[in-house]
Amino acid sequence: MSHHRHPVHADGAPPAVGPYVHAVRTGGLLFCSGQVSLHPETGELVGADAAAQAGRCLENLQAVCAASGASLGDAVKVTIYLRDMADYTAVNEVYGSFFESDPPARVAVAVAGLPLDARVEMDAVVALPD
């Protein structure tokens, strides 16, 4: 493993569903892998609708940030992947409750499908505290 690239394994986040780590720390930034709405203890997809799934995605991202000494509030960029753009407004409401002031830059895109048939997935780039 390179000295400038450090994998992050977050105990409070669900296990990866593929060959990847929760995040990689490098150069003062944390690059978080995509999170779907998996419950961290059961590994089961939770949330019947996109809003509920978005909340779990953000909670999972919070756990990944915490494992590196950061918080979701330190995010500089979030990408939201939606299986159906009709869910955009409902997801925005939940998302806004996690970023009540100074939200990060963001992209939301519609995709044909997501792992485990999830409705929402999110990833983030986070600035690590000094």
Image (spheres, grey):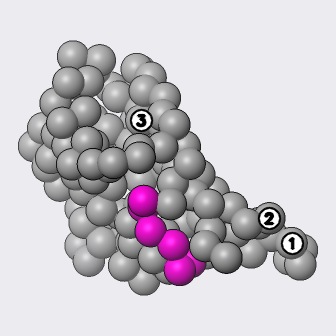
Mark 1 near mark 2, Cβ–Cβ under 8 Å? yes
Residue 27, numbered label: 2
**Distance of label 1 from label 3 (alpha carbons):** 27 Å
**Distance of label 2 from label 3 (alpha carbons):** 24 Å
Which amino acid, by three-letter code, is at mark 3?
Ile
Q: Residue farthest to the left?
A: 48
Magenta highlight: main SS: loop
User: Under tag 2, what secondary structure?
Assistant: loop
Q: Is residue 114 above or below residue 112?
A: below
Residue 110 % position (x, y): 40, 20
- Seen at 67% across and 76% down, the residue is 130
In magenta segment, residue 71: yes
User: Under tag 3, what secondary structure?
Assistant: strand
Q: Residue farthest to the top?
A: 86
Left or right of 24 on screen, residue 63: left
Residue 80, numbered label: 3
Q: Residue farthest to the front?
A: 101
- Seen at 42% across and 35% down, the residue is 80
Query: Upstream in the sequence, badge 1 or badge 2?
Result: 1
Residue 26 % position (x, y): 77, 66
Q: Residues within 10 Å of mark 1 (few under 14, many from 20)?
A: few
- Seen at 32% across and 26% down, the residue is 83
